[in-house]
Amino acid sequence: MLILPLYYAKDKNGLSKGWIQVIKNSIAKIAPHYTMKRQLDDYYSKFYEKQAKRFHELTKNNFRLAKDIALWKETVAERWDAINLVSSESSAPASGMHETGKEYLLRYVINEAGLDDAVALEKINVATNEAGEDYVFSVEPLKMVKKEGNNYTFEVKHSPKQAGQYKSAVRMYPKNENLPHRQDFCYVKWLQLPNC
């Protein structure tokens, strides 16, 4: 349906009946999605209900979960500087040039300093826009594939899908399934890519 002709097709009274019908139809179908009730329903389902559930989880059994999270955070904070990179390797060429369509293996071994599978790694790829500003182009999580004592091995098979020039690094951060969001505990370490 063409909107402009409807708007300019006026009758003898100067009314665009087709246009008016489109507007009435839009109000009838769209307005219910933009009412205060819809907004309150969203707040309730997306925030209030989830926060109430979270509150009950944290406070049951004499605040057991809240205490466990607090203890875990203290332990990670105490050992964070002791967590170290044991080794890193990549199947990419030493030049750092990756070809689209080819798959490369990236592997890191991390000594978690006595923590039990408490960190996660992800490869961050950064591009530069036309204004010269950097932005995160893609994020590739590394999977923990092996544990030997305190050493945890993380791997990702990555395949560039778009040509261009990108900067990349690996980010390590604490992980715990009981955190509401990873930014709830915002420690981070940046690890250089092998062959860089």
Image (cartoon, rainbow, N blue to C red):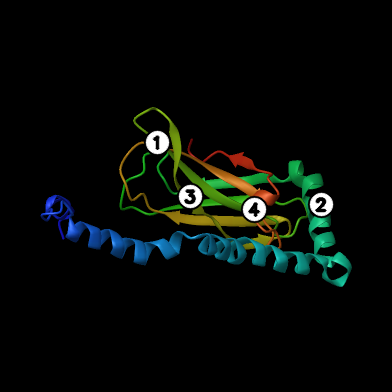
- Residue pointed to by mark 3: 139
Whether the residues at callouts 4 and 3 have beta carbons within 8 Å, the answer is no
Residue for badge 2: 75
Closer to viewer: mark 1 or mark 2: 2
Residue tagged 1: 95
Q: Indicate left or right for 33 with 81 as reference.
A: left
**Residue 182: image location, x then y, percent:** 64, 53
Spatial distance from mark 4 to mark 1, Cα to Cα? 34 Å
Are the residues tagged 4 and 2 within 8 Å (C-beta)?
A: no
Q: Is residue 96 above or below residue 180?
A: above
Q: Residue at x 38, y 53 (%)?
A: 159
- Which of the marked residues, 3 or 2, is nearer the chain's N terminus? 2
x and y, in percent, of residue 43 in the image: 59, 61
- Alpha carbon separation for disc pair 4 and 2: 16 Å
Q: Amino acid at mark 2?
A: Thr
Where residue 54 is drawn, which disc sits there? none
Q: Residues within 10 Å of mark 3 (few under 14, many from 20)?
A: some
